[in-house]
Image: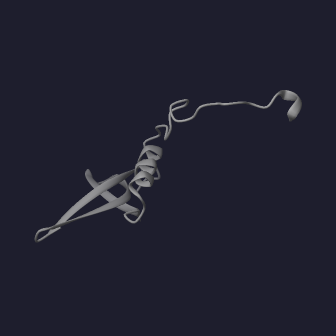
Amino acid sequence: MANEDVAMHVSKIVSRRGEKEYCSYLVRRSFRVNGKVKHETISNISKLPLVAIEAVSLALSKKSVVEAGSEFEITSSPSSQDC
């Protein structure tokens, strides 16, 4: 396998056993071998809170986890003399 720039992503795997449904969240990378797509699991992050899983997914897709100014309000800032 050539050493290329490999992008990772979060995959949601749903499995059903009878009436129950189980969800797993895996950090994976995809690559091709002889023209076929293969997946390698890097980590199982299923036990993390959903908020953390979403943050990992956003970070791996190179998007901002929090947009600037959307969640925070600047109430004061130190003057240059305070530093």
Residue drawn at (10%, 71%), measured in percent from left and top?
A: 18
Residue 17: which quarter of the image? bottom left
Outermost left residue: 18
Q: Is residue 76 above or below residue 57?
A: above
Looking at the picture, tell me which residue is in the foreground, 76 or 56: 76
- Side of 1 where 72 appears, left or right: right
Q: Position of residue 47 (x, y in %)?
A: 40, 66
Quadrant placement of the N terminus: bottom left
| Total residue callouts | 0
Is residue 25 at least partly visible in the picture?
Answer: yes
Outermost bottom residue: 18
Quadrant placement of the C terminus: top right
Residue drawn at (49%, 41%), measured in percent from left and top?
A: 65
Is residue 34 at least partly visible in the picture?
Answer: no
- Side of 79 where 68 appears, left or right: left
Residue 43: which quarter of the image? bottom left
Residue drawn at (22%, 60%), measured in percent from left and top?
A: 14
Q: Position of residue 31 (x, y in %)?
A: 35, 52
Looking at the picture, tell me which residue is in the foreground, 72 or 56: 72
